[in-house]
Amino acid sequence: MLKRSHDLVILGGVAAGTSAAAAAIRENKEKDVVIYQKEPFISYGGCGLPYAITGDVKNVDDVIAFSPEEFEKKKGAKVYTEHEAYDVDFDNKLVYIRNSKEEIEVSYDKLVISTGASPIIPGFDAIGNDGVFKMRNPNDDKAILNFIEKKSPKKAVIIGGGFIGVETAEGLLERGLQVDLIEGLDSLMGDIEPELHEDLLAKMEEEKVKVHLNNMVKNIVKKEDGFEVQTNNKSINTDMVIVAIGVRPNTQFLKDSGISMLKNGAIIINEKSETNIKDVYSAGDCASVKHLITGEDTYFPLGTTANKQGKIAGKNVFSTEKDEFKGIVGSFITKFKDLEYTRTGLTLKAAKEKGFDVDSVVIKSISRAGYYTGGGRIKMKMVFDKKTGRILGAHYIGKEVHARVNTMVSLIYKNSTVFDLLNMDLPYAPPFSPVWDINLIAASQAIKKI
Amino acid sequence: MLKRSHDLVILGGVAAGTSAAAAAIRENKEKDVVIYQKEPFISYGGCGLPYAITGDVKNVDDVIAFSPEEFEKKKGAKVYTEHEAYDVDFDNKLVYIRNSKEEIEVSYDKLVISTGASPIIPGFDAIGNDGVFKMRNPNDDKAILNFIEKKSPKKAVIIGGGFIGVETAEGLLERGLQVDLIEGLDSLMGDIEPELHEDLLAKMEEEKVKVHLNNMVKNIVKKEDGFEVQTNNKSINTDMVIVAIGVRPNTQFLKDSGISMLKNGAIIINEKSETNIKDVYSAGDCASVKHLITGEDTYFPLGTTANKQGKIAGKNVFSTEKDEFKGIVGSFITKFKDLEYTRTGLTLKAAKEKGFDVDSVVIKSISRAGYYTGGGRIKMKMVFDKKTGRILGAHYIGKEVHARVNTMVSLIYKNSTVFDLLNMDLPYAPPFSPVWDINLIAASQAIKKI
């Protein structure tokens, strides 16, 4: 078996891995830093992939920040693509890696595991056929676009109503397809607040997406002229299928290695991106993150967190002064056509489950002065502690919601209350806001309930 | 002399006055609440006036929320328009008011002074001629639009490069005029950070607005075919002139009344909207506001503050439990064409003058993921305390800046530091932000200087 040895071995080179490599080399230029990456490319913005389908990203390859060669040249880390870790021996500081030709025993001084996550693909009959896709890396996008161009499909089924499924629905609509969106639970977009879910469903209907809630997919079967998607309730014939049920951390190779994981296989890390194993760090979609409101280690795989955790891991491997990433408050933003959805903090249901004594207000308002052109409606739900007024969550659907949620991210970080928010000096002009911003109205309404 | 007596007399009925009336009646429906308003209309959004010139507000009257009759019916306060206060006798709780026909001695139990501010109009020769305008109330807008329609002017001079002048420049450009913008100081937009001012000037040039800085206007003279605007440096011939030099609180009638004022005549109020005179409250553009960073009573006349102070004044007049509006952090937003400018907190210069030991960073970034369509450049300057990292100011120019500034308003309110900001969980998706939002980059750069 081929043997190698490096100062820092990084497994996985997308958001967290490349951030870690760059930070490690900034910290200590003398060290030998190597990325082993399973896919043929590194450093891509996975969050941009649905937008290559909509056409808002011109070319799929635009989401790739660096080729392996560019990354090596500019950042100074050696990159091996199409190399996958298949085993570890933490006691002897070894990682076992294979490519199509050989197996390699790699000895490390420090290890960062940033192998990301992969879509969950159940073993349906038609999996593997051209026409059944996932949406995770640039090749998936290219395969979908190629299929659309070559086969001119009329109908698509998306399995999974999370944000990837919803964003991909927008993309396929833009490409002229008729879209059926199947979700096993009673709501799209995970645990979206029900008052906001209404608005999303109404928009889906307006855009002629057929939404099938409470439909568990049992099988996808290849037919002569396409596919049949079979759920517990119905069968839908279609020309193509996209499976976007969810993701699972790529940590199967760590089974029985002694590394601590959440139930779903995410590696548990602390604020310094350290695992329970000496000299082993982790970051990104294969790792946990601390939720700052609940204090719990949780799984909330997003690109921004991956970048931050990776940067912290890379900085810390060669540094005695350790940097920290304290965690998240659960911020998220997406859109379906011109309907934007964003949130930060907890839902009402989650806050109750975590033992908070909570109440909420639902506010309908507008994003600009009523007499000013453009803008549109916003619906907001704010969750707060009934006794102290502490803000625990803020959820928005509508237009120009990004400006609203950011106010609340900061307030939640700083353990603020609705009394802090009530008369806050948010900048106002008619093209940007009504004189009473929706957040101020929410505070005023919440205070009446305290 | 006609005599009247009311439980609550409110002088002025635009933002602060109508907010006070509505809040007072919500607090106690039994009381007799009366607004005396100098202009023929009440309750208008002055901030919307420049946008009736651009056309983004369809009709000038759209900025009027309530007619006097509607306000009386819906809110329950009696409204007298075209009634102006000309004297007070606080010892005997009397206000002297006149209209075109008579003078009235009005006895009050409680008084709210919300007379607003008026444009400063120097005594230039041509003042009073059709073609020389101010921009303060709906009639000004109508006169300008009427003049443009009837006379088809080709050229306009705007005197004053503050935000009203700049917004009006956009309006006149949209109406097809060639615009000269004259400013006595060396910068448009007041104390805008110089690094941001560059971008504003470049945009002005791109849009063919001729900006004349360091030009004090000495006179405006009527000519046969228009006007000549004479400065200390040059003369400019034009078809119309808009004077937007600044505003002065409408408090001349309170001279020698014993009420405490700032140097410029703004009534000094506390957090409860109380003046130094018993049972006399004030709010809005005629009043001071506390700056929460410096702790000083300052003059920062804006619509949002007027609404808040008015609401507090109205609530408090009839209530034993007094509400408070703590003050502002100096937030502001405007735009010129598609270039947006916003700020919160102090400038570098102001922070130094106030005795802070400060430093700053200037960051150039973009508003969306680089590979995603739309969005644009943002330049940001952040001002912070060199030792503690406390954030003292954040200033932005470019695209989609509203979402950025709101993060910082909250942080400044909560006395936060750049360390708080560094890894904050701001919501990210390619249509809304790059993976490292400009605020996070600023924090990272600032920390290197601490």
Image (cartoon, coloured by chain):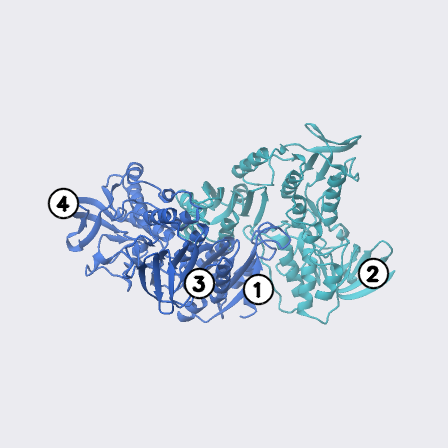
Chain colours: A cyan, B blue
Point out residue B160 in the picture as x, y percentages from the top left corner: 38, 61
Q: CA distance from mark 3 to mark 4?
A: 53 Å
Q: CA distance from mark 2 to mark 4?
A: 99 Å
Query: Tag 1 or tag 4, which sits nearer the N-term?
Result: 4
Numbered tag placed on residue A75 in the rendering: none
Q: Amino acid at mark 2?
A: Glu
For label 2, the crowd category at 10 Å Cα-Cα, with few meaning under 14, some 14 to 19 and many 20 or more, is some
Residue occupied by mark 1: B444
Q: In which quadrant of the rendered image does the N terminus of chain A lie?
A: bottom right
Q: Nearer the viewer, mark 3 or mark 4?
A: 3
Residue occupied by mark 4: B3
Residue occupied by mark 3: B211
> Is residue A450 in sight in this rendering?
no
Asked if badge 2 and badge 1 are on a common chain, one would say no
Question: In the rendered structure, are the residues bearing label 1 and label 3 in contact, judged by CB atoms less than 8 Å apart?
Answer: no
Point out residue B221 in the picture as x, y percentages from the top left corner: 31, 61
> Is residue B420 in sight in this rendering?
yes
For label 4, the crowd category at 10 Å Cα-Cα, with few meaning under 14, some 14 to 19 and many 20 or more, is few
Numbered tag placed on residue A105 in the rendering: 2
Q: Amino acid at mark 3?
A: Val
Asked if badge 1 and badge 3 are on a common chain, one would say yes
Q: CA distance from mark 1 to mark 3?
A: 36 Å
For label 3, the crowd category at 10 Å Cα-Cα, with few meaning under 14, some 14 to 19 and many 20 or more, is many
Extreme residue toward the front, this view? B224
